[in-house]
Image (spheres, rainbow, N blue to C red):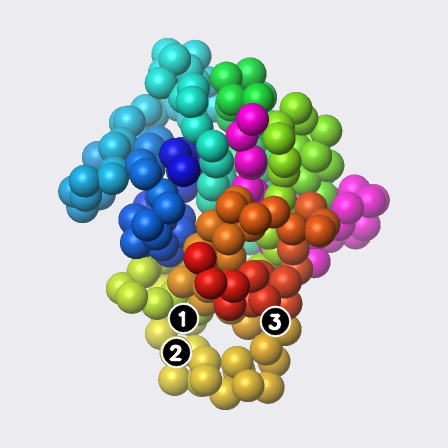
């Protein structure tokens, strides 16, 4: 399986990249990054490209892939809807349209979030925008589209968030993770589990296009 990954330097993307490099069924991973610096690996190739919203310059390099893991995202905290939509809906749809043209047999995997509003009509801004993004992806001409809605994600194996206050929060929660996993298993997952789940769904599919946190944990447990 040949994979292209967006968001490899973010917390979720770091976890997904780690699992891709460990998976024996993944032949190669192409990552699109704004700045070079990822550790070298025989499976890994990176393209440094500043404007992800316009892939025309590198479009020829984006053909021939079996799966895309789209892990780009920002927190909506403090953002107005127009700005959040630009970096969530507009960016994601632009990338997906390019990939769909070049890879009609691709499976597209999008990391959304628990509480996303598929109706696009709710009161919560980020949930509406995420819902609009999900709905747009489902209409695209891919082989399949799967939307992952994790709730709380515990970073493992040295994975770090680039947002300072998130980092402090995850450090605080780390000792409580085993208890949270026991008491609230349907709302807790890890970067490792999310990455494994995405890989397993890319290989085997899933009965529904939307995977909630409990589905993510279930698919994580499936052996590769």
Quarter occupied by residue 11: bottom left
In the image, 133 versus 26, the foreground residue is 26
Callout 1 secondary element = helix
How far from the left and from the top, in percent, is residue 129? 68, 41
Residue 170, disc: 1
Q: Earlier in the sequence, mark 3 or mark 2?
A: 2
Q: Residue 68: in sight, yes or no?
A: yes
Image quarter (top left, top right, bottom left or bottom right) of the N terminus: top left
At a point 63% along the width and 38% down the height, the residue shown is: 145
Residue 73 located left or right of residue 145: left
Q: CA distance from mark 1 to mark 3?
A: 15 Å
Reply above or below: 11 against 6. below
At a point 27% along the width and 64% down the height, the residue shown is: 158
Which residue was labeled with disc 2?
174
Residue 209 located left or right of residue 18: right
Callout 3 secondary element = helix
Report if residue 129 lies within the magenta region.
Answer: yes
Callout 2 secondary element = helix
In the image, 82 versus 174, the foreground residue is 174
Label 3: few (<14), some (14–19) or many (≥20) C-alpha neighbours in 10 Å: some
Report if residue 159 lies within the magenta region.
Answer: no
Q: Residue 74: in sight, yes or no?
A: no
At a point 57% along the width and 22% down the height, the residue shown is: 104
Image quarter (top left, top right, bottom left or bottom right) of the C terminus: bottom left
Q: Which residues are magenta?
A: 105-130
How far from the left and from the top, in percent, is residue 186? 63, 73
Reply above or below: 20 against 177. above
Q: How many marks?
A: 3
Q: Nearer the viewer, mark 1 or mark 3?
A: 3
Label 2: few (<14), some (14–19) or many (≥20) C-alpha neighbours in 10 Å: some
Q: CA distance from mark 3 to mark 2?
A: 15 Å
Residue 187, disc: 3
């Amino acid at each position: 399986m040949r994979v292209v990954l967006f968001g490899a330097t973010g917390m979720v993307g770091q976890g997904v990249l780690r699992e891709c490099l460990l998976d024996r069924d993944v032949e190669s991973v192409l990552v699109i990054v704004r700045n070079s610096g990822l550790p070298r690996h025989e499976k890994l190739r990176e393209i440094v490209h500043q404007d992800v919203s316009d892939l025309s310059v590198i479009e020829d390099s984006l053909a021939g892939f079996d799966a895309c893991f789209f892990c780009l995202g920002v927190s909506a905290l403090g953002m107005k809807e127009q700005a959040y939509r630009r970096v969530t809906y507009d960016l994601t749809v632009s990338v997906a349209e390019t990939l769909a043209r070049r890879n009609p047999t691709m499976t597209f995997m999008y990391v959304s979030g628990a509480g996303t509003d598929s109706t696009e009509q709710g009161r919560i801004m980020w949930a509406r925008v995420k819902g609009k993004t999900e709905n747009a992806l489902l209409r695209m001409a891919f082989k399949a589209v799967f939307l992952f809605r994790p709730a709380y994600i515990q970073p493992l194996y040295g994975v770090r968030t680039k947002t300072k206050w998130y980092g402090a929060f995850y450090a605080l929660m780390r000792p409580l993770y085993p208890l949270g996993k026991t008491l609230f298993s349907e709302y807790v997952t890890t970067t490792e589990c999310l990455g494994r789940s995405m890989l397993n769904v890319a290989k085997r599919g899933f009965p529904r296009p939307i995977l909630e946190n409990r589905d993510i944990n279930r698919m994580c447990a499936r052996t590769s």
